[in-house]
Image (cartoon, rainbow, N blue to C red):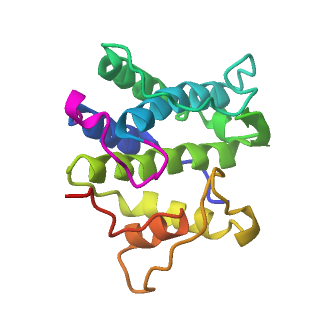
């Protein structure tokens, strides 16, 4: 594995993307074929809690089961809640102990370092999902993409199924931008755009 990463850039970027989402966007389609914008926002709200608990090695409740299917039903102050949860997530993963030993996320025991990379993956990839679905620009730090490419590339074809961490890979040219290659490895079509 690659060591400890600061999730601050990814959490700040996700927060900016969420700030650009309004009520009119919530029922819009996303690159995740089964999820609307509202459902992905709901998923992000849940994953911030779960991966904060995973960083703290707090195994009570939030880390014991796979995430519930997001409904997209959001409380009125969801954006303020997201800002606070994203900040807490970044803070939790600044602790070097978060990256060591074993933790749990989604009911699965895994090395702390892997959990941190999964959290980073969720932020980077779902940030792109939400940005492209709502017409916002999206760019990532090269270090984030490099770490994600190595991690996503290590997942075998047998582990790539609908509903898993990564869907089946989408073919992307080898000379495509790094973000596009990452998106392809995570089962996304980098050319996806909202209909219309």
Whether the magenta-drawn stretch holds residue 30 is answered as yes
- Image check: 192 left or right of 67? left
Q: Does residue 160 appear to the left or right of 28 in the view shown?
A: right
Residue 102 or 25: which is nearer the viewer? Answer: 25
Q: Is residue 57 above or below residue 98?
A: above
On screen, residue 85 versus residue 105, left or right, reads left
Coordinates of residue 124 in the picture (x, y in percent): 43, 51
Residue 114 seen from this side? yes
- Judged by its main secondary structure, the magenta piece is loop
Side of 101 where 43 appears, left or right: left
Q: Residue at x 60, y 43 (%)?
A: 116
For the C terminus, the quadrant is: bottom left
Query: Does residue 90 appear anywhere in the picture?
Result: no
Q: Pick out the residue farthest to the top.
A: 76
Residue 9 picture quarter: top left
Identify the residue shown where x is 45% and y is 43%: 35
Measured as percent of width and height from the top left, residue 192 is found at 33, 64
Q: Is residue 58 magenta?
A: no
Decide which of 3, 180 is in the foreground and name it: 180
Q: Residue at x 42, y 21 (%)?
A: 73
The tally of labels here is: 0
Q: Looking at the image, which residue sits at the far front?
A: 196
Q: Position of residue 28 (x, y in %)?
A: 30, 42
Q: What residue range appears in magenta?
A: 21-35
Query: Looking at the picture, does residue 120 appear above or below residue 61?
Result: below
- Quadrant in which the N terminus appears: bottom right
Q: Measured from the top left, where is residue 89 in percent x and y?
A: 49, 29
């Amino acid at each position: 594995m690659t060591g400890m990463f600061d999730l601050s850039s990814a959490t700040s970027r996700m927060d900016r993307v969420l700030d650009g989402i309004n009520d009119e966007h919530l029922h819009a389609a996303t690159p995740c074929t089964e999820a609307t914008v509202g459902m992905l926002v709901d998923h992000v709200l849940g994953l911030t809690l779960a991966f904060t608990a995973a960083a703290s090695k707090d195994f009570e409740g939030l880390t014991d089961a796979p995430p519930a299917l997001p409904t997209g039903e959001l409380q009125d102050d969801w954006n303020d809640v997201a800002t606070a949860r994203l900040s807490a997530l970044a803070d939790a993963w600044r602790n070097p102990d978060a990256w060591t030993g074993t933790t749990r996320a989604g009911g699965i025991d895994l090395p702390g370092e892997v959990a941190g990379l999964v959290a980073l993956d969720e932020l980077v990839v779902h940030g792109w999902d939400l940005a492209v679905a709502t017409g916002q620009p999206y760019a990532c730090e090269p270090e984030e993409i490099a770490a994600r490419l190595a991690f996503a590339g290590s997942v075998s074809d047998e582990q790539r199924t609908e509903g898993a961490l990564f869907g089946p890979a989408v073919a992307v040219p080898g000379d495509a931008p790094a973000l596009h290659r990452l998106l392809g490895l995570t089962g996304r079509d980098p050319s996806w755009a909202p209909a219309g």
